[in-house]
Amino acid sequence: MSKGLEFFRKMLEEERDRLRAELEAARRKEPLGNIGYSNHMAETATEAFEQTKGQSLERRLERLLADVEYALSKFEKGTYGICENCGKPIDPARLEALPYAVLCFECQHRYEFVPQKGIGNI
């Protein structure tokens, strides 16, 4: 790898810290009132939309955080930057763009276009 592993570890640790802070802030937001207790349908719909949007954001942040923490765990195993499907090194340019990538570009491409198969069966 042209970029050292420490570069990617630092990148992932910074992303982990950012995601944790963002998730904590999202969870601290005041929940909206009880949906359905408004006199106006538009107001009720807006409240429902905002609540759903907040829950969706939290789930997305949780998934990203899990991906980042998983990538960090791969450093301990000595497998960071190695494709989980074919075992070849993941291109450093891909890792720089997506430091928590677990598949090389070729395997990811095949996985996206053959969704009925799991990662180990690409």
Image (tube, rainbow, N blue to C red):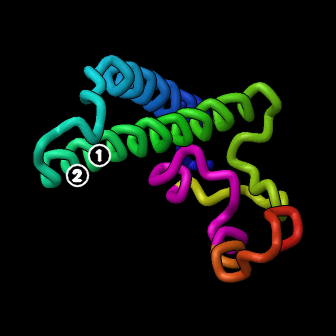
Residue range (magenta): 93-108
Q: Is residue 32 left or right of residue 63?
A: left
- Asked whether 112 or 2 is in front, the reply is 112
The spot of residue 8 in percent (x, y) is 54, 36
The spot of residue 69 in percent (x, y) is 62, 30
Q: Is residue 9 left or right of residue 40?
A: right
Q: Is residue 86 above or below residue 53?
A: below
Mark 1 lies on residue: 48
**Residue positioned 25% across, 29% down in the render:** 32
Q: CA distance from mark 2 to mark 1?
A: 5 Å
- Asked whether 70 or 10 is in front, the reply is 70
**Residue positioned 47% across, 44% down in the render:** 60
Q: Residues within 10 Å of mark 1 (few under 14, many from 20)?
A: some
Q: Do labels 2 and 1 touch, CB within 8 Å? A: yes
Residue type pointed to by label 1: Ala
Mark 2 lies on residue: 45
Q: Determine which quarter of the picture holds residue 117.
A: bottom right
Whether 101 is among the magenta residues is yes
Secondary structure under the numbered disc 2 in the rendered image = helix
**Residue positioned 30% across, 25% down in the render:** 31
The spot of residue 90 in percent (x, y) is 67, 57
- Asked whether 107 or 38 is in front, the reply is 38
Q: Is residue 54 left or right of residue 1?
A: left
Q: Residues within 10 Å of mark 2 (few under 14, many from 20)?
A: some
Q: Is residue 62 above or below residue 56?
A: above
- Asked whether 15 or 50 is in front, the reply is 50
**Residue positioned 33% across, 17% down in the render:** 28
Q: Is residue 59 above or below residue 91?
A: above
Whether 74 is among the magenta residues is no
The spot of residue 98 in percent (x, y) is 50, 51
Quadrant in which the C terminus is drawn:
bottom right
Residue type pointed to by label 2: Ala
